[in-house]
Amino acid sequence: MKQVESLTSPGTTLELVTMQLGDQPFGIAVEHVHDVLESQRITRVPMAPGAIIGSLNLRGRIVTVLDLRTALGLDRAANPEQSMIVVIAQDRELYALLVDQVGDVLPVQRASLEPLPQTLSAGWRAMSGGIVKLADQLLLMLLPERLLAAVVSSEQAGAHA
């Protein structure tokens, strides 16, 4: 919870890389984003669980590719070859998030980050750090460490089922 508290400290700006899955906007703090890539060749991994769709070679590093739609409980993309990739760094590892499209870097006052509503499902709450009100929609801020932990725990639960 300290992560969320530090994100809401007043007087500072948080920069979010915005992305879309369908018509839902999301954001990840720019400090976690390593690269933004056009569609890449993804090597499928046999018997890979759920959201893990394969690996890619990023300048000599093998990077695990996660289908963010699947990780968030949405239907897979109709045309994954048109997807974009947001590479995030977590604990010195790189993970590639397959998204429908990537937008701009959005500066947000940390004080304007709204807490998550109690009606939001536990799964979404587990991966989110708050909501930003935009002119015509709400942007859900994803916390990479929570997102990756949720994907790993759901994969482990599936392995034990």
Image (cartoon, rainbow, N blue to C red):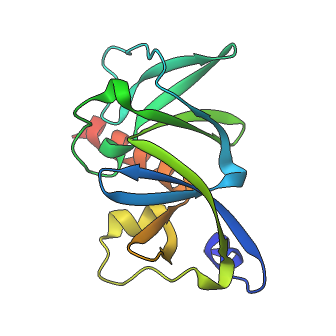
Q: In the image, is residue 47 above or below residue 130? A: above
Comparing 41 with 159, the one in front is 41
Q: In the image, is residue 53 above or below residue 1? A: above
Where's residue 40, x and y in %?
49, 20
User: Which quadrant of the rendered structure holds the C terminus?
Assistant: top left
For image coordinates 27% across by 40% down, the residue present is: 158
Comparing 110 with 23, the one in front is 23
Comparing 129 with 138, the one in front is 138
Where's residue 134, x and y in %?
47, 75
| Quadrant of the rendered image containing residue 136 | bottom left
Where's residue 149, x and y in %?
49, 50
Q: Residue furthest front?
A: 135
| Quadrant of the rendered image containing residue 10 | bottom right
Comparing 109 with 57, the one in front is 109
For image coordinates 29% across by 71% down, the residue present is: 121
Instruction: Give left or right: position of 110 versus 139.
Output: right
| Quadrant of the rendered image containing residue 47 | top left
Instruction: Give left or right: position of 65 versus 14.
Output: left
User: Which quadrant of the rendered structure holds the N terminus?
Assistant: bottom right
Where's residue 70, x and y in %?
30, 42
